[in-house]
Amino acid sequence: MNDANDLSALFERCGIGASRRTGGTLVVRSAIDGAELARLHETPEASMPEVIARARAAFQRWRDVPAPVRGELVRLWGEELRKGKADIGRVISVEVGKIAQEGLGEVQEGVDICEFALGLSRQLHGKTIVSERPGHRMMEQYHPLGPVAIITAFNFPSAVFAWNAAIALVCGDPVIFKPSEKAPLSGLATFRALERAIARFGDRAPEGLAQIVVGRAAQAEALVDSPDIPLVSATGSTRMGREVGPRVAARFGRRILELGGNNAMIVTPNADIDMALRAILFSAVGTAGQRCTSLRRLIVHRSVKDVLIPKLLAAYESLRIGHPLEEGTLVGPLIDEAAFHALQLAVAEVEAQGGRMLTGGGRVLADRFPKAFYVRPAIAEMPVQTGLVRRETFGPLLYVLAYDDFEEAIELHNDVPQGLSSCIFSNDMREVERFISASGSDCGMANANIGPSGAEIGGAFGGEKETGGDRESGSDAWKQYMRRTSNTINYSTELPLAQGITFG
Ligand code: NAD
């Protein structure tokens, strides 16, 4: 299934065959079996100023292309992604180990955001505002902002670029993409689809409109520090955000930070337990627990715990763990050895912090895949929300906490440093409404009777607290990619001052 000829043909079809053979210093391995997939040439740090200058020059032209014409470019990109969906989805599976359905779903998010951005390209409008002065009118306009840097994490190597780039491009902004060093091939395949769209769009697209930079933190830092990049959209760990945030702020740039999560589900006494069970399974073990929105904390009422947990353990028993492209597999590998060690560290801490492992946590399939890291998804019961539970461990480890009183559940829910996604399973309208109210979940996303992961592109995506506080993708997230001007127009023959001031 990872046959060398097949892979070569796949990479050729995605337009990344040549990049693979550049014999550079960035070694890319498949999460499936640890096999080397490519040695990529890294963009030299010394050439970063040129990259930024090209984007700057492209901006001078792109900002004057009418937005609906810019929309035509993302329409073409959406077409290319649709055509390449099976292949790009497969590259994602081969590189980061997502099961086939999840690889395809990720490309579909790209298609969806292109369609959203196309519609948006005719709706980038501001308000008309009444003036206090006679013969005056006020209005606001949204103008293109400038080059946008898009720095992405390994776990959504295609979709996060598409979310940002589709919106940035219709907003009139050139893009510079720095994919994760752990998943550059998926990023390149998605970027090649954009390049094909640009080729079809012809000379209406200026040179340098979309660029990709292959490398690690150093290349990203050049973008973070450049005053010629007015917006840095960075997705990754809270550790990364702590470095990027202050650096962008120091030069008064804008940032969109999409950082770690510690997402919970509250299961109340009258929840539909079977539905909750299915939602827990998808959100806790899907993508091997490596989604920023993965379910990490299950806050369950004591009266339903003894019904729910045995069912959950039985479901975990039957989970098929294995090669992500084999039929029936639900759990693929972790990204790499470091992720495996981080998980082992957390599992070892469970007992030390008064908890009890209920299942999983150990390595499996080491015989078949000695250079890759598959684990049995784990559940740990914790007596209280310890330091371990409050930290994001990026793998399939679910903590179970019991509660007696609904207020206590909400308190537990919010008592973590992160604030990305959340959900409640309840058929009690009061509990549901309370959970999504001002005094309920403090997360950027709060759901009822669905899990915390698998967001649609139509909503604004992002979270509070250490998750970064920003939003991307749908709703009005586009406003961050543009600059707003407020205009006052005087069509009278007088020059009245606001606030009734007389002068002279
Ligand atoms: P990471 O922080 O290791 O790397 C993310 C990106 O940041 C990479 O491209 C990396 O090269 C770059 N980077 C690292 N240090 C940098 C620095 N000092 N300056 C500039 N760039 C730097 O994250 P990862 O391991 O790839 O991804 C997993 C993490 O991402 C998890 O914490 C997960 O929750 C988070 N994540 C969040 C979202 C979200 O939308 N909130 C989405 C996906 C992943």
Image: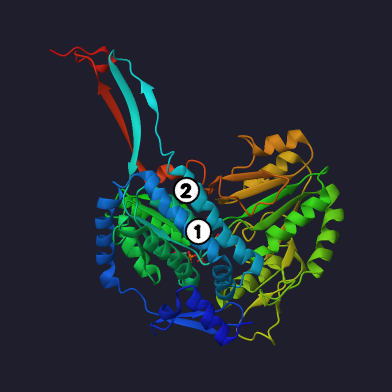
Is residue 470 among the parts visible in the rendering? Answer: no
Q: Position of residue 243 (x, y in %)?
A: 40, 59
**354, above or below 405, in the image:** below
Label 2 crowd (10 A; few <14 / some 14-19 / many >=20): many
Q: Is mark 1 within 8 Å of ligand 1?
A: no
Element at label 1: helix
Left or right for 110, reference 327 = left
Q: Amino acid at mark 1?
A: Glu
Looking at the picture, tell me which residue is in the foreground, 288 or 97: 97
Is residue 208 among the parts visible in the rendering? Answer: yes
Residue behind mark 1 = 79
State the count of labels.
Answer: 2
Name which residue lies at 37% across and 44% down: 67
Q: Amino acid at mark 2?
A: Ala
Name which residue lies at 68% across and 64% down: 397
Q: Position of residue 174 (x, y in %)?
A: 34, 55
**261, above or below 199, in the image:** above
Q: Position of residue 486 (x, y in %)?
A: 31, 31
Residue behind mark 2 = 117
Name which residue lies at 66% across and 74% down: 325
**241, above or below 270, in the image:** below
Quarter holding the N terminus is: bottom right
Q: Earlier in the sequence, mark 2 or mark 1?
A: 1
